[in-house]
Image (cartoon, grey):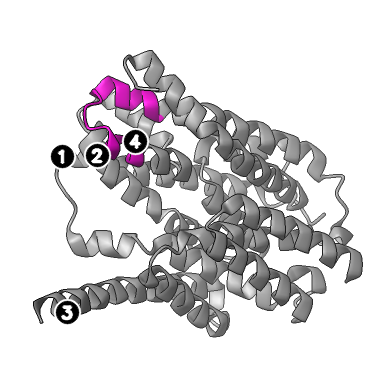
Amino acid sequence: MTQAPDPTLLWTIIIGLAVGSFALRFAFIGLMGGRTMPAWLMRHLRYTAVAIIPALVAPLVAWPTPTGGTPSLPHVAVAVAVFALGYLTRNVLIAMGAGACGFLLLFLFH
Amino acid sequence: MAITTTKSAFWKGFRDGAPFLLVSGPFGLLFGVLAAEAGLIVPEALVFSLSVFAGSAQFTALQLMQENTPTLIILVSALAVNLRVAMYSASLTPYLGEAPLWQRACAAYLTVDQSYALSIVQFENNPQMTLSQRLAYFFGTNGCVAPGWMAATFIGALLGAQVPDSWGLDFVLPLAFLAMVGPMLRTPAHVVACFAAVATALPATALPYNLGLIVAGMVGMMAGAQAELWIEQRKTGKDAA
């Protein structure tokens, strides 16, 4: 277990995220009323999740924490397999099952 | 079953949302365990899940906190991950925008991937639904997901302290995210956004303060938006020809 985070930092993050997340969700339904959003903004918003989540994941796969950041082919292989299964089956549950199996293999043999 | 009353609308939403417990349950467990491993105590992890109620943003914040990232960058990155809920909110507005303010505030808090995905399909396919039926359906979809998420966080945080570091549990997070992203890539433009973000993210790790995440995310978004425009133009060009 790592050292506990500084309480001021932790609570700043929790409160900041709680307020920020709510503001994002409330912004349109609460304040915009029936007005529609500009098309260019909606077009960019459509790609936030599929851009930012892979951007977060890529370094964690390339330099995995469990190996201390040393690149590891088995970790990359499992990650690619989970991603490919999710993409091909369009099914989160199948992909998550594959992820659990892959993790078990890494745990047992790596 | 056809929706005839507000009550039946709620239970229809409840049944439609129930299978998503299989997703939000494991994610909540994982968040609880990783939060405990990061040194958070049970009440802290629980308040985190209860007040923020946005899994991917919570995981992002947790990960960046452990990498000694400046507070502002943590907040901006985690909220950027969650920008998609702003899009959900905008797209639900035509259906729920007429509700009283306090109900819209509750709906805003409960706007997550699952409730949005189920509700928008339901509302589009059943234009005869009344406002109160729509709201009831929307709240119903969260009937299992929201309590499941909280309970799973709690159990995960309780168990987490007993999981040894040697299990390498940190690697479950990227795997869980990958499992989630795969099915989200529904169009070629989604794929472009994803790979542009990955291609930028790897070299961008050289940037200080984990700024690389925001830069790569923005590059991915712009690439996706441009790809969408380009594909549309080609389509209309072909139709005209």
- Chain label for disc 1: A
**Cα distance between the residues tagged 1 and 2:** 6 Å
Q: Is residue B88 above or below residue B193?
A: above
Q: Which residue is mark 2?
A: B93
Give the residue at mark 4. Answer: B122
Q: Are marks 1 and 2 in contact (CB under 8 Å)?
A: yes
- What secondary structure is found at the residue carrying circle 1? loop
Q: CA distance from mark 4 to mark 3?
A: 33 Å
Question: What segment carries the magenta color?
Answer: B120-138
Position in image of residue B86 (x %, y %): 34, 49
Amino acid carrying mark 2 in the image: Thr
Image coordinates of residue B118 in percent, x first then y, are 41, 39
Chain for numbered disc 2: B
Q: CA distance from mark 3 to mark 2?
A: 34 Å
Q: Residue furthest left?
A: B240
The answer to whether A42 is drawn above or below residue B239 in the figure is above
Residue A85 in sight:
yes
Q: Can you tell which of label 4 and label 3 is closer to the viewer?
A: 3
Q: Label 3, on which residue?
A: B238
Q: Residues within 10 Å of mark 2 (few under 14, many from 20)?
A: many
Q: Is residue A104 left or right of residue B27?
A: right
Position in image of residue A83 (x %, y %): 60, 67
Considering the numbered disc 2 on the image, is that residue within a helix, a strand or a loop? helix
Amino acid type of the residue that numbered disc 4 sits on in the rendered structure: Gln
Closer to viewer: mark 3 or mark 2: 3
Marks 1,4: beta carbons within 8 A: no
